[in-house]
């Protein structure tokens, strides 16, 4: 533990020194004042990138010196239609919602209604973590910086497009075992932001949705932004999510995450997000009015949790030396400047918001395809252009890296297929696997046998089924009807009496949830 804490302390110290140096650096000269628009050539770059990455459409906004330098769309909203993306096209911004939630709690701090370090139990007395001590100690601040001890994406399957309400999703948290001690490591937790949204409700009597609309969307003129798929379905000029499935783009329905809005629920456009970036770059001021105290803004940008940078990532981007998490924001450096940013991903949607405070420069990128890195590539391209550095082709570099990852994934699947033990049988006939099952976090599941075929029904996700095919021994491959979930392996286990007792499953640990869920069979049915 000591070396780890030393590393953390050193990195925090480096970060503080970096901020001090940044504050003394003079305002960089705007290249536009020297040789025309710095964004000249961006159209061609984006259009080539869209084709290279096979992304249907995107929009991008650039904010410089408290004004929108660019807000524009490229490509189409839906591959089945020719309707173009523009600056007002709505996309899901997913985890970019987290910074709004942190800022909302900051508003309550500046109004004296809460403190960052108030215990969560003060506002949500029924809240529980698995660890009683962590339950007592966890604060409002802890909810916003991914140090609760829970696994990255742990428990997300329980709310990810499920029928559960926010209250039901919140109650499931108490069953999740921590993967490290409280406040000793980084684990990206959407569910802690769900809790943060419920704190807002407890303190104000307003839902997270109403608070965000009243305190941010309306004052900032974010007139098309909203927090619900139900609202989105009634609106025009909305991008369609797309997945890449077996080399083909597939339009899919919007994922309904209204039950976890404070973590991932906002839908917005780059025209609207440009106003949010202006607020951030102006330290909480907007059009002459101080909406957020500068002290609140600074608190959200203080480092709270260390994020490791792998050797591969250091080699890929040698211009970044640290990675930390503040309150709802990622904190890193790039070419000697601080970047405050976040990314967001939901089924068929990827997005980015970020800014360089010293350069008064912000970027938002929204796309209608998942599983890519183009939004980061475009942001770095814009930063490079305004900094006047030698341009890296970040799109080409990220694309090469993505293709390498995809190749490794194909090879892993081939190894898995080659390792399959042929000509095995399950320990029991199929009817013994059928029945009702339960997991404390997820809830109920059911396996039915019909025409000698087994089907798995995850009951919190009506309409999604899994077809079970024997793989080897008591392992079955589950082919989900959801293009997002793809496939899983179901591992059945026996009790001491030799009866089928439970099964274990993971659902898209690279996208949905990293936890393995154990479902116990319900006896006596």
Image (cartoon, rainbow, N blue to C red):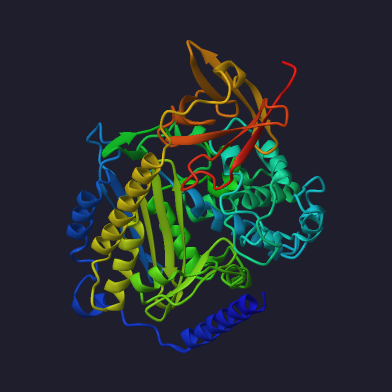
Q: Is residue 153 left or right of residue 409?
A: right
Q: Which residue occupies the foreground of this view, 8 or 118? A: 8
Number of residue marks: 0
Q: What quarter of the picture does the C terminus occupy?
A: top right
Q: In this view, does 393 lie to the left or right of 264?
A: left
Q: Which residue appears at 44% of the width and 35% of the height? A: 487
Residue 215 image offset from top left, x and y in percent: 59, 53
Q: Is residue 58 left or right of residue 480?
A: left
Residue 407 image offset from top left, x and y in percent: 30, 51
Question: Please, is residue 25 above or below residue 500 in the view?
Answer: below
Q: What quarter of the picture does the N terminus occupy?
A: bottom right
Q: Which residue appears at 53% of the width and 54% of the height? A: 219
Q: Which residue occupies the foreground of this view, 510 or 450? A: 450
Residue 382 image offset from top left, x and y in percent: 30, 67
Question: Please, is residue 321 above or below residue 351 in the view?
Answer: below
Q: Which residue appears at 61% of the width and 60% of the height? A: 146
Q: In this view, does 109 lie to the left or right of 123?
A: left
Is residue 195 among the parts visible in the rendering?
yes
Q: Which residue occupies the foreground of this view, 406 or 362? A: 406
Question: Please, is residue 35 above or below residue 407 in the view?
Answer: below
Q: Which residue occupies the foreground of this view, 376 or 61? A: 376
Furthest residue to the top?
Answer: 451
Residue 97 image offset from top left, x and y in percent: 52, 52
Furthest residue to the front?
Answer: 423
Is residue 287 among the parts visible in the rendering?
no
Q: In which quarter of the image is residue 481?
A: top left
């Amino acid at each position: 533990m000591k070396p780890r804490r030393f590393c953390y302390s050193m990195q925090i110290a480096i970060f503080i020194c970096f901020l001090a140096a940044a504050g003394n650096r003079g305002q960089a000269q705007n290249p536009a004042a020297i040789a025309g628009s710095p964004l000249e050539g961006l159209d061609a770059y984006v259009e080539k990138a869209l084709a290279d990455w096979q992304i249907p459409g995107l929009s991008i906004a650039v904010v410089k010196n408290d004004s929108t330098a660019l807000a524009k769309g490229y490509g189409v909203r839906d591959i089945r239609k020719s309707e173009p993306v523009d600056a007002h096209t709505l996309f899901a911004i997913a985890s970019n919602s987290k910074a709004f939630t942190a800022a909302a709690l900051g508003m309550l701090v500046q109004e004296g209604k809460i403190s960052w370090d108030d215990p969560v139990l003060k506002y949500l007395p029924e809240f529980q973590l698995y660890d009683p001590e962590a339950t007592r100690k966890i604060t409002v601040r802890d909810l916003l910086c991914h140090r609760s001890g829970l696994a990255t994406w742990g428990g997300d399957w329980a709310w990810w497009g499920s029928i559960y309400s926010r209250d039901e999703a919140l109650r499931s948290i108490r069953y999740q075992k921590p993967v490290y001690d409280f406040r000793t490591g980084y684990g990206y937790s959407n569910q802690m932001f769900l809790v943060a949204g419920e704190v807002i409700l407890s303190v104000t009597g307003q839902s997270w949705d109403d608070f965000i609309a009243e305190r941010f969307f309306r004052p900032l003129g974010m007139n098309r932004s909203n927090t619900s798929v139900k609202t989105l379905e009634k609106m025009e000029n909305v991008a369609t999510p797309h997945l890449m499935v077996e080399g083909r783009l597939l339009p899919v329905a919007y994922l309904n995450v209204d039950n976890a809005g404070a973590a991932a629920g906002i839908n917005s456009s780059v025209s609207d997000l440009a106003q949010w970036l202006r607020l951030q770059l102006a330290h909480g001021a907007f059009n002459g009015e101080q909406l957020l105290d500068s002290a609140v803004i600074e608190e959200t940008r203080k480092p709270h949790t260390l994020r490791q940078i792998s050797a591969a990532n250091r080699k890929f981007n040698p211009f970044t030396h640290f990675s930390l998490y503040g309150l709802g924001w990622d904190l890193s450096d790039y070419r000697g400047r601080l970047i405050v940013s976040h990314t967001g991903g939901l089924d068929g949607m990827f997005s980015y918001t970020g800014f360089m405070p010293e350069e008064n420069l912000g970027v938002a990128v929204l796309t209608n395809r998942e599983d890519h890195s183009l939004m980061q590539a475009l942001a770095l391209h814009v930063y490079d252009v305004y900094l006047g550095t030698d341009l890296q082709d970040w799109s080409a570099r990220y694309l090469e890296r993505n293709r390498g990852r995809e190749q490794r994934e194909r090879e892993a699947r081939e190894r898995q297929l080659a390792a399959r033990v042929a000509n095995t049988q399950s320990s029991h006939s199929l009817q013994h696997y059928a029945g009702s099952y339960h997991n404390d976090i997820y809830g109920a599941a059911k396996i039915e046998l019909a025409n000698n075929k087994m089907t798995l029904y995850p009951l919190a996700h009506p309409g999604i089924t899994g077809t079970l095919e024997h793989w080897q021994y008591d392992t079955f491959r589950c082919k989900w009807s959801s293009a997002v979930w793809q496939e899983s392996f179901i591992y059945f286990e026996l009790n001491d009496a030799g009866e089928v007792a439970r099964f274990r499953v993971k659902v898209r640990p690279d996208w949905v949830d990293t936890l393995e869920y154990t479902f116990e069979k319900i006896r006596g049915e």
